[in-house]
Amino acid sequence: MAKKKQHPDPGAGNLWGIDLGGTKIEGVVLRSAQDPEVLFRDRVPTEADQGYEHILEQIHKLVEMMKAALGTVPTMIGFATPGTVDPRRGTMKNCNTVVMNGKPMQADIARVLGVPVRLANDANCFALAETRWGIVKQEYPDARIVFGVIIGTGVGGGVVIDGRSIAGLQGIGGEWGHNFLDESGGPCYCGKSGCVERVISGPMLQQYYFKETGNNKPLKDIVALAESKVDPTAQKTMIRLVHFFGKAMSVIINILDPDVIVIGGGVGNIALLYDRGRDAVKQNVFNDRLDTPIVRPMLGDSAGVFGAAFLVDDAV
Ligand SMILES: [Zn+2]
């Protein structure tokens, strides 16, 4: 039996990532950026109702579990967060886990863990993971500009250029969900009105259907009813989605002209987006054709935590 060669520095090159969710905090350790085998993966509850300090304690607990399992310590840890870090103030903003807003999380986590950390919005982590390991790496390895978007309960986006996540001057790079789309969307929690998120997110599609019919149905039922052509209002909801998807997505292409667009989230699962939705984008883009691949992600729910781990490599 061949003897396993001992690595001189066990753990060197490992990527440690944590996805800070509203209900769970998930950690992963990948062998390396080139060989991202999962060496560790586990989670602890966020228990956000117990306050900000408790969240920091839960993060600490998870990292101790990771250290014990690996027998090594990290040199840096990447974090996917629900909101974004304000680069000037160093505080969190736009988090739906509201106790995090206004808190200097990057500094606090680094202090509690005694290790440098890098934070990025979860949509940026999604885009980074799909680029470095997911569908872009598999199918479009030469892509230089990638736009990743999550269309689900909310709408978030992230830009990756040459394999690196772009935060932007104010930390809002890629925040396409709060571009103006249509007045019919009405007031948004962000203080603006008619945001992309207010028109094409899952809850807004359900709300549109509810307003038209008085029936509150889950999105997947509305999609199924539209597909079986038995419910004109469900069909109308989908036609409206396609219309506004085309308008909203064309803005991204006119500005970035990305090599590939990856769409995650519950709304991103709707098959219609990839044929009629694509046609609508083509009609709205400033070009006489549309070469841009618009594709589904590969990593599913894992993209956030894997993207967090890739932030470490991104920072090197
Ligand atoms: Zn908004």
Image (spheres, rainbow, N blue to C red):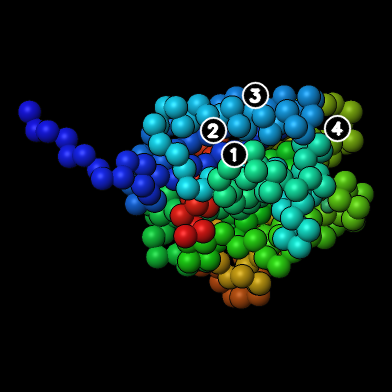
Checking the image for residue 63, the label placed there is 2
Question: Which residue is rendered at x = 75% and y = 32% of the image?
Answer: 53
- Where does residue 254 sit, x and y in percent of width and height? 65, 72
| Contact? badges 1 and 2 (CB < 8 Å) | yes
Give the label, 3 or 1, closer to the camera: 1
Mark 1 lies on a secondary structure that is helix
Q: Left or right? Give the position of 105 relative to 158.
A: right
Which amino acid type is shown beneath numbered disc 1?
Leu
Q: CA distance from mark 1 to mark 2?
A: 8 Å
Q: CA distance from mark 1 to mark 4?
A: 47 Å
Q: CA distance from mark 3 to mark 2?
A: 13 Å
- The residue where tag 4 is placed is 210
Give the label, 3 or 4, closer to the camera: 3
Circle 4 packing at 10 Å, graded few (<14), some (14-19), many (20+), is some
Which amino acid type is shown beneath numbered disc 3?
Pro
- Along the polypeptide, which appears first: circle 3 or circle 4? 3
Q: CA distance from mark 3 to mark 1?
A: 18 Å
- The residue where tag 1 is placed is 113
